[in-house]
Amino acid sequence: MSSAAPEAPRAPLESIHSARRASALLNPMRLRLLRLAQEPASATELARRLSLPRQRVNYHVRELARAGFLRPAGRRRRRNWIEQRYVATARSYVLSPEILGALAPDWRTIEDTASADYLLALSEQVRLDVSRAEQEARGRGQRVGTLSFKSQFRFDSSEQRAEFANALRQAVVEVIARHTSPDRSASGSIRPGRGRSYRLVLGCYPVPHRQETPGAEPEAEGE
């Protein structure tokens, strides 16, 4: 016999903004539990699937629930006791760069704009911007309007790559000038207006020869 409360919709992805929550998450055992808890399960069920003692698994389940990564998902009667079942709050998680504080990468401090370091730092800025905008929008019961574009292609030479970069840069500048409003006034101050400022970031990088499988479980196991 089981009783389940109506399950609230889960986010496909949740950004982690605090070091405390990140610390609670970054444990191989807890990462495995969150993968298994994509469907409602009790600590006993999870322990059985992992072939581990229930007390050990129950400790990690409580810590995940306390940190907000698991939420109650109904109860189930088993013999003479009632088990609490839990489900993961999201399908996947991402750590916000702001967790690192002053150590977070800053693209403005990297002079070589063609380097991998610059692109990585800029990508972290995008992640931080989008996660903060999503937090603000969620607080107002709104959605964030974004535009994403992905393509994969091949260059036969460095000359072809340089020609592509120049042509793409010119095309983007032309489209921005034609279809948007200036973000700053002639004096350099932020231009007032009814609209909202947007940031466009384009990155191009070589595809790694070895691609790791998304969602692979950690090899090590810890407490």
Image (cartoon, grey):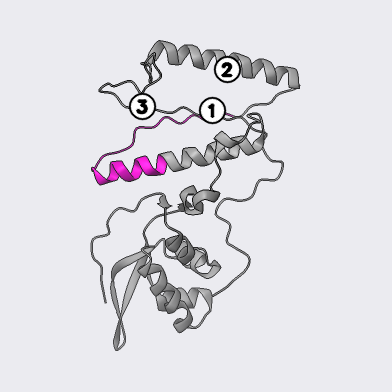
What residue is disc 3 on? 197
- Is disc 3 placed on a helix, strand or loop? loop
Does the magenta run of residues contain 146? yes
- Numbered-mark total: 3
Q: Which residues are magenta?
A: 130-151
Give 91 or 48, whichever is nearer the viewer: 91
Q: Position of residue 159 (x, y in %)?
A: 74, 17
> Would you place residue 198 above or below residue 210 in this image?
above
- Is disc 2 placed on a helix, strand or loop? helix
Image quadrant where residue 170 sits: top right
- Whichever of callouts 2 and 3 sits on the residue coming sooner in the sequence is 2
Mark 1: amino acid: Leu
CA distance separating discs 1 and 2: 10 Å
What residue is disc 2 on? 168
What residue is disc 1 on? 202
Q: Farthest residue in the front direction? A: 187
